[in-house]
Amino acid sequence: MKGERLGEFEELILLCVRQLGEEANGSTIQAMLAEVAGREVTLGAIYAALDRSQRKGLAESWLGEPTAARGGRAKRHYAITARGESELRESRLIRDRLWNPSEATP
Amino acid sequence: MTAPKRISPIVARLVSIVVPSHRRDEVLADLASSHRLRESRLGRRKADRYLYREVASLLFWRLRWWRGAHAARETASVTGTGSRSIGRDVVYDMRYGARALLRQPGFTLTAVAVLGLGIGAPATVFTLVNQIFLDPPEHITEPDRLIRLTRSWAPGQGGGALQNADYVYYRDNASTLDGLAAYGEERMVAYTLDGNARDQLRVLFASDNFFDLLGVTPILGRAFLPEENRTPGTHPVVVLGHHFWKRALGGDSAIVGRTLTLGSAPYTVIGVTPEGFGAVSPIGEAPDAWVPIAMYGALTRANSTDWWERHPNMRSRWLVALGRLAPGVTFEAARANLLALGEALQFEGKSDEEGAFVQRQFLYSPRMEANLSNLSRMLLAVVGFVLAIAAANVAVLLLTRASARSREMEIRAALGAGRGRITRQIMVETLLLGILGGLLGIGLAFLLSDLAASFLPVQFVAEFRPSLKVMALASALSIETAMSVSLAPAAIAGRG
């Protein structure tokens, strides 16, 4: 268990969710990771990370309307919460400071 | 957006087993989209392979979820006082069992190793028997209709090579066959491409109808033509083996029509065989290339035509013939026909005993020879003993452990666990051992099959790998073994 800290994989997933906006669901997150990060990740791993994020209050999910394009099945949408957004920014800030100590804003 | 491709019913079924109903639809929807996107990025085959990885990942996801959601209820599960379904109880039993096994790594490792050896031995033997005798060779159509014709020199003794003239005689006169091809004598030949001297390659001489008779169609170019095998030395053409084409020539798709120097003469590449086609039996090494029989003299720099014309010289015998039974003709009828032709064949210097010798080309014909099934039975009996000894050892280990754990069982009984619950706990623990042992056994079969095959007195073309059939059998064996050895300790624990 990673405790309450933001894990590296979790962070990637949340960034995808943030980037995808209304389009964020299991398969679009997976496709984005493959394209941007070059990582072939399984849906199970993505769901597990999303479950964990939701338990920590970093993301939320709801079941959408069934659409014809997905074979009449409803998809689960994901979005990051305000707390998730601030965790992501915090994590980025730490990285920026470590990469470039002189330029970072306090 | 294009319409979603439906995922296979097998995968859908697996998902419905792994994923609870309230999340099933969304997971299936994601899986279908994911598969479609992968298909466009990576191609159909890779995308299909990923589907099973996805299902495995879903299983781990659900297991993790269970662990998180039910950590609090663990105490109740140990005693079995909670009211829950049997299915969920078994999941708890498995987790409890896994921890119990981890607490005693020495016992667990020993039991798993013994079971693994017990399962690995039959799995290895099954792999060999299966692949040599039961699996049909790749790309060869109706292998059970193929016969092997060689020369007999005394009653009941045969396997001698034929002269080219003999082959032509049988080919033109056998009325019970759909065709008779011939191949002979592999040669290692140095080859050159684009003026660069390369390595050596293994050439097999084959008659013009060789590929047609087997039912093998080249993936590039064509097979031999009759005129390429009519007169000695006039048609320098070569068909390349798939693995050689890939390995040495980089799978160049424009290879047909190019020239390969074999020895010192140029040969035109006319075709490439399909992947997996090697030799005409599981015995022997796969050739790198095939050239017409008529090129034998040119390629081996023979200074006479003994190998082509009829000649009493022993060295003029160098061919083995392969025939295909005509539709409706039995092996026995074809054999009688060829033996009669052998007797009728007359030439100067032929001895009275000399004649035709006919065998089935493949041992795994539906009418498998009696001695072969006896051999398999004996092998299976031996590995059965190995498994029985392994099972007995594990049973002893389990009994010892059961008496050592009587205190633990008393505590569980005092906390309210019923007799059935404790018995099931022991059985589930043993099942876990069986699963681990089975996995180890299958792993051993992967490692040992090639090694075991190398002890056989013949060389095989194919690499030996446990097939799905073998793995299913090994899994069934390990679960059955685990269940049967768990009976005594489970009874003891339940009584205590």
Image (cartoon, helix red, strand yellow):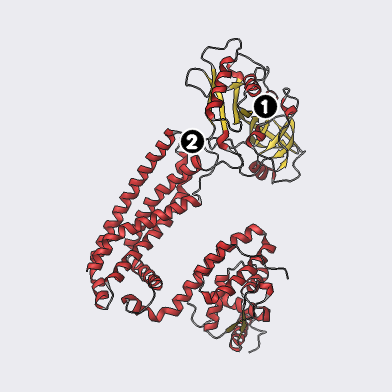
Image height of B223 relative to B383, above or below: above
Above or below for B279 versus A94: above
In the rendered image, the residue lying farthest to the front is B328
Mark 2: give few (<14), some (14-19) or many (20+) Cα within 10 Å.
few
Residue found farthest to the right: B257
* Residue at screen point 67% across, 28% down: B207
Three-letter code, disc 1: Ile
Find residue B347 and report its image quarter: top right
Q: Position of residue B40 (x, y in %)?
A: 70, 63
Number of marks in the image? 2
Is residue B160 something one can see in this rendering? no
Between disc 2 and disc 1, the foreground one is: 2
Q: At numbered mark 2, what does the secondary structure look like: helix, strand or loop?
A: loop
Report in which chain the residue with disc 2 lies: B
Q: Nearer the viewer, residue A18 or B333?
A: B333
Q: Which residue is mark 1?
A: B293
Q: Position of residue B297 (x, y in %)?
A: 68, 23
Chain letter for mark 1: B
| Residue B168 occupies quadrant | top right
Q: Quadrant of the C terminus of chain B?
A: bottom left
The x, y position of residue B250, in whole percent, is 69, 46
Circle 1 Cα neighbour tier, 10 Å, few/some/many (<14 / 14–19 / ≥20): many
In the visual, does B183 lie left or right of B481? right
Would you say B248 lies left or right of A60 here? right
Tell me which amino acid carries mark 2.
Answer: Arg
Q: Quadrant of residue B422?
A: bottom left
Mark 1 residue element: helix
The one of B463 and B391 positioned closer to us in this rendering: B391
Residue to which mark 2 is pinned: B367
